[in-house]
Amino acid sequence: MQESRYNPNLDILKAGSMEMKGEECRLSNFMGAIALSDLVKTTLGPKGMDKILQSSGRTGHNSVNVTNDGATILKSIVVDNPAAKILIDISKTQDDEVGDGTTTVCVLAGELLRQAEKLIMIEQLHPQIIIDGWREAANVARQALEASAVCHFDNDESFKKDLINIARTTLSSKVLSIDKDHFAQLAVDAVLRIGGASSPKNQPAGHSKRPRNLELISIIKKLGSTMHDSYLDNGFLLDKKIGIGQPRRLENAKILVANTSMDTDKIKIFGARVKTDSLEAVAGIEKAEKEKMKTKVDKILKFGCNCFINRQLIYNYPEELFANAGVMAIEHADFDGIERLAFALGGEVVSQFDDPTGVKMGECELIDEVMIGEDTLIRFSGLNGGKACTIVLRGSSAQLLDEADRSLRDALCIVASTVRDSRVVFGAGCSESLMAAAVSKAAANLRSEEDLKTVNKKSYGKVKAMEAFAQALIQIPLIIGESAGMSAQFAHDLAELHRRAPADAPCRQGLDINNGTFLDAQEAGITESFLSKSSSLEYAVEAAEMILRVDDIIRCAPRQRR
């Protein structure tokens, strides 16, 4: 037999490149993912701790951000480990799709990899065998979660109560937990307002077709007063000023929303120079510019609008022309705000004014000014384009308002997700314990360990992987309890309660972190969105599988500067 001339140690990579293989590669992935999971797991639950995120700019200005929101923390940190980056990506996906559960998905993926490390190092199991066991366990857990879900879609009163309970559960771990009942009601009222008054009856069970566009909900932060003074305004508030000498109140407004330059009363060409031989020539140039601007304003007035909103600045001369015509002009509306406002008004953003017939203008019943603290804002009421609304947040500091803004947005997203899929499951560690109990029962039903060792090592590995999956699920209530000062034994006792519960009477027990005991999550109203919980499970398993499959990491050589 001819000897192979292939050298397995031959380095084919470019100089400066790095490669990690086998055990070294897996160890690097395990360490990175578990370290990131340990970073955010202390923020999990109603008693979770906060993190201070401090950035230093080149000018020496340091911004301080105090938060326990998993998505904010993970987006703010910079990591070099590829496995940790995968967990950050799934957290962003969870945040985009559901709006909550970002910490849970990261922690669950990290705990799965922690268990996988033990199976590989101690039990000497192949990663593919572990993945097969995880997939079987994930299917069992998902079925148990679906079986435990309840839906009050056909009862408007019960459905709204579920939404409020879910919002309260979400806000329990946020800075707004002090007044979570008030803010939960604000979030639910805002989401239901923008969805129309159509009844949920005669819709497919568990799924709603009522539109919930969260862009119609604007959140304005104003320093001063207390957080309890935050309120929901049924109009759309714009934090801008009305032009000088223009009407401060308009009824039955016809609104033209535009993105155009209204400051051409001076030459703006970069590096341009105008040479003249007399002051009369300069006056002629200024007169020509004013005539050009007057022509543009006349074109705008031909649209028949009595309110003009522009994304860009409106200089003194066009502002004077609008005031003389009795038109309200609002300048420098930021791009995000003007897009949302045009959508709420039922109009469109215009940049050309040659054809008034092909433009759809916005309408509203009333435009007036409203005082919030020491600031004056513009309010649009009776919008025809949609039932837009604004939540005004009050607070004593900018950091508090920022965190309250993030918390309320999470509540809005999770309420909107629940409207999309109205099934709810129970919190306080109930759902994770229930899924862990179902997975443990499924693993026990396969075969005893003694028989599996002698018959089929792959089946034995599959059972061990399923048991490890159940242990990873139990870590979620364990972390929630530890954050509240409870013993880890409570989480294991809770899992045992669910394991002993009969199939026809599922257990609803969860952790009572206030009294250090157990409670009935259904009676306590601690509910969570089924969509959020199932998404966290699926994304965590997918990310853990992806990381576990990797057996080689190749880092490209850095580009050389010339």
Image (cartoon, rainbow, N blue to C red):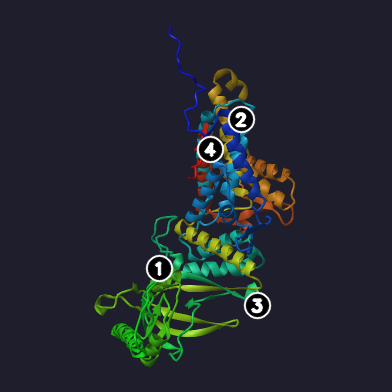
Q: Residues within 10 Å of mark 4 (few under 14, many from 20)?
A: many
Q: Position of residue 520 (x, y in %)?
A: 65, 53
Residue on which the image places disc 4: 547
Residue labelled with disc 3: 225
Neighbours of disc 1 within 10 Å: few (<14), some (14-19), many (20+): few
> Separation of disc 1 and disc 2 at Cα?
53 Å
**Which three-letter amino acid code belongs to the residue tagged 2?**
Leu
**What residue is pinned by disc 2?**
119
Q: Nearer the viewer, residue 171 or 85?
A: 85
Question: Residue 239 location in percent, x, y?
Answer: 51, 77
Q: Which mark is residue 198?
A: 1
Q: CA distance from mark 3 to mark 1?
A: 37 Å
- In the image, which disc is placed on residue 401? none
Query: Closer to the N terminus: mark 1 or mark 2?
Result: 2
The type of residue carrying mark 1 is: Ser
> Front-most of 184 and 288?
288
Report which quarter residue 264 is drawn in. bottom left
Which sits earlier in the primary sequence, circle 3 or circle 1?
Answer: 1
Q: Which residue corresponds to the image point at 54% horizontal and 45% vertical from the top-left?
A: 85
First-in-chain label (4 vs 3)? 3
Q: Is residue 421 above or below residue 279?
A: above
CA–CA distance between discs 3 and 2?
A: 55 Å
Q: Which residue is more in the foreground, 318 or 97? A: 318
Disc 2: CA contacts within 10 A as few (<14), some (14-19) or many (>=20): some
Q: Secondary structure at mark 1?
A: loop
Of the image marks 3 and 2, the number of the one nearer the N terminus: 2
Q: Is residue 154 left or right of residue 496?
A: left
Q: Residue at 54% across / 67% down in the picture?
A: 187
Nearer the observer, 209 or 109: 109
The residue tagged with tag 3: helix, strand or loop? loop
